[in-house]
Image: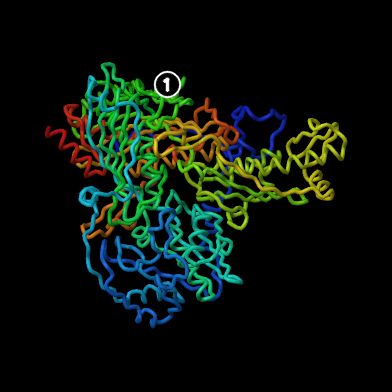
Amino acid sequence: MSQELGETRIQDRGEAGTIVPDLHHDLPPAKESITGGVAARLAHDSAAKHVSGAARYIDDDPELPGTLHCYIAMSTRAHARIVSMDLAAVRAAPGVALVLTAADIPGKNDYSPVFGDDPIFATTEVEYVGQSIFAVAAETLDLARRAAKLAEVHYEDLPAAITIDEAERFADEAGADLLPAHEMRLGDAGAALAGAATRVSGALDLGGQDHFYLEGQIAVAVPGEDGDVTVRSSTQHPSEVQHNVAKALGVPDHVVTVEIRRMGGGFGGKESQPALFAAVAALTAVKTGRAAKCRLDRDDDMEMTGKRHEARIRYDLGFDTEGRIVAAEMEQLIRCGYSKDLSGAIADRAMFHADNAYALSAARIHSRRLKTHTVSNTAFRGFGGPQGMVGIERAMDKAAFSLGLDPLDLRKRNFYPAEGGALTPYHMEVTDCVIAEMVEELETSSDYRARRAAVTAFNAQNRILKKGLALTPVKFGISFTTSHLNQAGALVHIYKDGSVALNHGGTEMGQGLFTKVAQVVAEEFQIDVERIRITGTTTAKVPNTSATAASSGSDLNGMAAQAASRTIKDRLIAYAVERYHVPVDQVVFLPNRVRIGNEEKSFNDLVGEAYLARVSLSSTGFYATPGISYDRESASGKPFYYFAYGAACSEVVIDTMTGENRLLRADILHDCGRSLNPALDLGQIEGGFIQGMGWLTMEELWWDKAGRLRTHAPSTYKIPTANDRPDDLRVRLWEKGYNRAETIYRSKAVGEPPFMLAISVFSALTDAVLAAGEGRAFPDLDAPATPERVLAAVEAVRGR
């Protein structure tokens, strides 16, 4: 197969540190530029530290003398009553300082984000293998682990639902799902389906995905005076960790400070999950008066923490004689795990994206949220959106087969119109749709038509190797669909020497958020970005923050930092107007200096003068996304501030003898609006695409009948590596990109939308399997499309 891969071709991305010309038309023209303002291709602020090993993560910090190490003992049963638990031998073991159970929690035994159903320690019943039942704090982690093994725990097994089939059957028998079902309706889908010229139906199973962040879950707690505690937690949501730790301790939030400088990846797995480990560390620290560390190894991390939600999508689409969708019905079964966690909002997001980029004149989207006795699934990049999108993209592929059309032609006939007027299934008008124009551009630049002919010719000449090609769109809504989360705060200080300190509620997990927000502040003051000190996120400086999630990090925190900067800037202008007796419009900030009337002075000098004149050089900033809301009762509203768009064309080859498959080439065109930092955005696009490809082609979670996760380490769970990156990968930002919504410098979010570009890989694999059966039967291929599944699908289409 390697002979078919072709030559390596990687698009030139430009040199880091350069300024992108004419990318940001909203900025005033200047004869000279600052170093690293908005639109500059800056490297990540910690990039050199990442590759050199100098970047300090929580486990790299020196341990305080006497630091205790916590080990969390886990349930060995999927669903059982705890008949008895004798921990006497654990407490007496060498080096043990403290053993914690539910009875030792002074506040609430709960670390859940919303519903109060995630106990820190199980009490009378366990509901998944890996659930925490007690914790041991000892002088070393090895001593704590050894002591935990001395516990005598006796269970009485109860019926357990592990698979989605069992979950659906258990829910039907019980007459209730984990969370109430939700439905969106637009028009009369049933009547429209009944009258459709062509009708296509089917089902698709989508597997879960482990976050597989490089840095595992970890928290360090240090006790202070008067019961105060400081927690360094690897978390995307410091305020939620703060609240849950305080709740467990039975104290007000202000007693707890949560800090985080950087994470080694998050992807949603460090949104709600870190609260458990932070709570254990904090309880230990407060009870013993000693610093405490709770750090998971990879196996325990994968067993204890939630994953992407598995889903089963059932679809029924009707088309007219010209291939336009007249109606769509979708049923989404979402496998939530043992508790509710964030499953309600995640399942809703899957519904919000069941249309992807296609205008559905009539639709019914029905969602069920099912309980299984496995770890509670949680936030993951895309937050349910990918599951919704894959469903309709599979339906489009199958409809194209039924109608005898090229799948791209069918897709193009059904895009939301650029001029607006079409409603989503939740009754939001799509007014900013540029997907048709982007797809046309990518179709040309990727040479789709010629390559389609070449793939067909290749398949006709090769019996064992078969190629597939697909071009798929992405339309992704940007905002938290829980409306109150769309807010952010920032804090900016200018010191009297002109140096700047920046703090905001966003967290840095490797995506470059801190760099982008620093660029915003540099742009506002027209100073070099090197003059801005980026400080770690802490609840002591910016309170009540939302998670760094929903692709909103730059949108929210950039606007908050801009607001803080402009407050200080206005004060400096007011000072200059009064001091130098000039009109407001004659105070102009230029690169690293300020023109006041006919004179210029350095930024530092103006700041020094303002300090002596007792002008405040510190300000908070706040931003709340305007004009968004969603009414669950009517399943209607405007949950998104705007949409991000993208398209990808992927070419794959499969070995029909083994099912082995490989991505040969991918062409990506993505809309970042007016990019704040093209270098970082290109990195996010490539990384999201590869992670999405991993979900859809190789990352397989497997539980045995007893509910034990068997894919709990790199030895048994396969993630994409550098070798899985296609040799020919062409990634471009859409040059016409512009955000009609008033976002920070008209940029668009880029964290999650690129993940769904990888659906093109899954569709291309479907196309290759279709070719293996000489186009006689449409394949039933579930995700992840592992070699085993590809081989089974090939044999099925050949058999039919």
Q: Is residue 389 left or right of residue 478?
A: left
Q: Image point 45% across, 51% down: which residue? A: 266
Does 300 appear above or below 19?
below
Q: Image point 67% across, 44% down: which residue? A: 564
Quarter of the image for residue 599 reads top right
Q: 579 or 647, which lies in front?
A: 579
Q: Can you give x and y, in whole percent of width and height, for residue 222 in the image?
A: 55, 68
Outermost front residue: 633
Residue tagged by mark 1?
Answer: 417
Q: Can you give x and y, in whole percent of width and height, for residue 380 in the image?
A: 40, 47
Q: 452 or 523, which lies in front?
A: 523
SS at mark 1? loop
Q: Can you give x and y, in whole percent of width and height, for residue 608 in the image?
A: 81, 48
Q: Image point 65% across, 49% down: which residue? A: 491
Three-letter code, disc 1:
Pro
Residue 563 visible in the displayed image = yes
- Point out the image quarter for the N terminus: top left
Outermost top residue: 322
Does 589 appear above or below 485?
above
Quarter of the image for residue 519 reads top right
What crowding class fits label 1: few (fewer than 14 Cα within 10 Å), some (14-19), or many (20 or more)?
A: some
Q: 401 or 20, which lies in front?
A: 401
- Point out the image quarter for the C terminus: top left
Residue 698 visible in the displayed image = no
Q: Image point 61% across, 71% down: which residue? A: 225
Does 253 appear above or below 100?
above
Q: Can you give x and y, in whole percent of width and height, for residue 513 in the image?
A: 55, 45
